[in-house]
Image: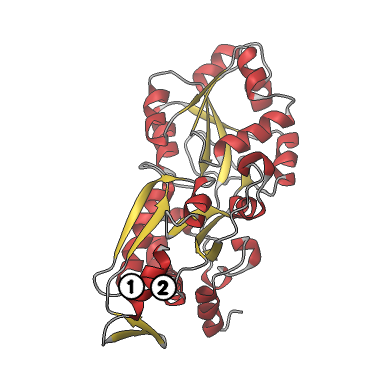
Amino acid sequence: MQFTRRAALLALGASSLSVSGTAFAQAGTDLKFGAMPLGSIWYVFAASVAKHVQPALPAGSKVDIIARGGGIGNPILVNEGKADVAFANVITSVWAMNGEEEIYKGKKYPNIRALLGGLNEVWIAGMLTEDYIRRTGNDALDKALLSKDPPRLIMKPAGSTVPPSVRIIFESLGLTFDKYRAAGGQIIQIDVGQIPNMMRNGRADLYFESVSPGHPATQEVTLTVPMRFMDLPDRSLKALAQNGLKVHPLPASFKGQNGPTKAADFGTNMIVHKDMPDATAYAITKAVIENRDAIVAENKAMEGFVAKDAWRPENVGIPLHPGAIRYYKERGWM
């Protein structure tokens, strides 16, 4: 397995670099960092985090960002050793470990461990174009979805947390994707980088996204197309809460919001494989925590990241890696 090879690399060499008492070999190692496609906020986050993690690894090490994956897919990539470290959602990490029936088809992914969490809040949000609202009079999300003139819906493809969240919203309203299509609704699923252009070209009316303040695609859409953020219906919020999401408002962060928007939060953590060498897991955790201010300065959407709470169960969702536990205990936080 790839981590056995990396562990061997870390054991080689006559000289070693001490990382807070941990022998860390000079031989370089490459880490694959699971994020999301270009244009996503996780890709931006990963580029920033990698910049601070790489110097903490042995000389000659490299961190490569994987421009695919997402909240659903990244736990699978890490579990199968196709990514060494990745962003995930707290809720999808739990779903993956437990083999959630609808999303993971009952298959469990038990090899993932957390390094830290509470990185940022990620809300499921829906936005209607002002043109659609003006044309139909449907100025509420449930009113639009259940109308005789349903909006053309656009969102990311499978692998993102968006489609299963939208499915939960639909089901709370008595809809399914098939029923929606049968009623004349259109569902478009494409990579996030293509969505702003589709919206500008007038090819969609309703945009569902997993958003944080500063989310690149959402910023681009709302700055170039007149949009209005929709409160999620109360029955949808209840259904999302029953599926493990945290219900609290999306603060006013984008053009198209007149104030906080009723929404639900997935949470963001950082996960690795359970067989990652303890020294590597320790070094990554230490680098992120101790460069928290610099990382947040580069990513305003992470302003809510509280370093001393990064280990807490509600922020990680799944068991911590032993290397991360060691760091938190050294800090006196656990």
Residue 61 in view (yes/no) = yes
**Quarter location, residue 20:** bottom left
Q: Amino acid at mark 1?
A: Leu
Instruction: Name which residue lies at 42% across and 26% down.
Output: 225
On the picture, is 292 further left or further right than 329? left
Classify the position of the N terminus by image quarter.
Answer: bottom left
Q: Are marks 2 and 1 in contact (CB under 8 Å)?
A: yes
Q: Position of residue 106 (x, y in %)?
A: 66, 45
Instruction: Name which residue lies at 48% across and 40% down.
Output: 254
On the picture, is 21 further left or further right than 327? left
* Tag 1 residue: 57
Q: How many neighbours does mark 1 have within 10 angstroms: few (below 14), some (14-19), or many (20 or more)?
A: many
**Quarter location, residue 33:** bottom left
- Depicted 113 relative to depicted 206: above or below: below
- Depicted 73 relative to depicted 141: above or below: below
On the picture, is 105 further left or further right than 57? right
Q: Earlier in the sequence, mark 2 or mark 1?
A: 1
- Depicted 224 relative to depicted 286: above or below: above
Q: Number of callouts in the render?
A: 2
Q: Which is nearer the eye, 67 or 43?
A: 67
**Quarter location, residue 264:** top right
Instruction: Name which residue lies at 36% across and 75% down.
Output: 8
Q: Position of residue 249 (x, y in %)?
A: 63, 46
Instruction: Name which residue lies at 52% across and 50% down.
Output: 76
Q: Amino acid at mark 2?
A: Thr
On the picture, is 164 further left or further right than 284? right
Classify the position of the C terminus by image quarter.
Answer: bottom right
Q: Which numbered dot is residue 280? A: 2
